[in-house]
Image: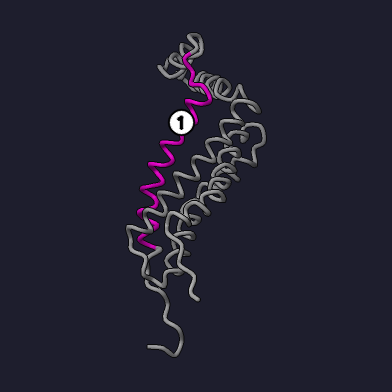
Amino acid sequence: MMRPKKSIYQHAGEWGVPFGLYLSCAAIASIFADMFQPLSLVFLILLAGIPVVVYYFQRRKFIEDEGFTEYAGLWMLGIMLFILGSMLASLIVFLVLQYVRPGFIYEQAQLVIETYDKLPGGGNSEVPKMMKRMIEEKMLPSPIEMVFDVFWFVTFGGSLLSALTALIAQRPLAKHRGQE
């Protein structure tokens, strides 16, 4: 008896969790990179691997469907992976920013100010002045605001990236030896 093939949405639901954990690891590496420098490299490697992971899932679906998945379906799979993965990563990052490292946003703003102050003529730039004003007037984004901004950026960027990886994932299947 043939098992019915899973839909794109079923696959996205299943694969969205590991993809969300992957995105979470990248985000957490970024958040703690200032405390432990090797995490910067980990973050960059994970960031560069995102297209590879998305391609892997799209190609897996294409092969499962024996090459009959349309481009739009692979693209939708990528979009759904990014939406679901970003939802999970957003929750995890929010918890980290809210409870594990609540001063992260303030610390990053201070780092920007210090960096500009060290540059020749950088202290006269508008950027450190603006950051100081944001700190003084308590205008820095809250963890939830930061998470929502990143969520929308990742899902939008992910939809564009998925369009490209879907093109690559849709390459023809290799023929078996002996068949022509």
Main SS category, magenta section: helix
- Residue 104 lies in the magenta stretch: no
In the image, farthest residue toward the front: 1
Q: Position of residue 151 (x, y in %)?
A: 45, 36
Foreground residue among 105 and 127: 105
Image quadrant in which the C terminus is located? bottom left
Crowdedness of circle 1 by 10 Å Cα count: few (<14), some, many (20+)?
some
Q: Residue at x 50, y 45 (%)?
A: 85
Q: Residue at x 59, y 28 (%)?
A: 97
In this rendering, the answer to whether 49 lies above or below 69 is: above
Q: Residue at x 40, y 49 (%)?
A: 79
Displayed quadrant of residue 39: top right
In this rendering, the answer to whether 75 lies above or below 118 is: below
Displayed quadrant of residue 94: top right
Foreground residue among 121 and 83: 83
Q: How many marks?
A: 1
Residue type for callout 1: Phe
Foreground residue among 42 and 161: 161
Q: Which residue is mark 1?
A: 148
User: What is the magenta range?
Assistant: 139-168
Q: Position of residue 64 (x, y in %)?
A: 46, 69
- Dot 1: what SS? helix
Q: State the scheme by which the image is colored.
A: one colour
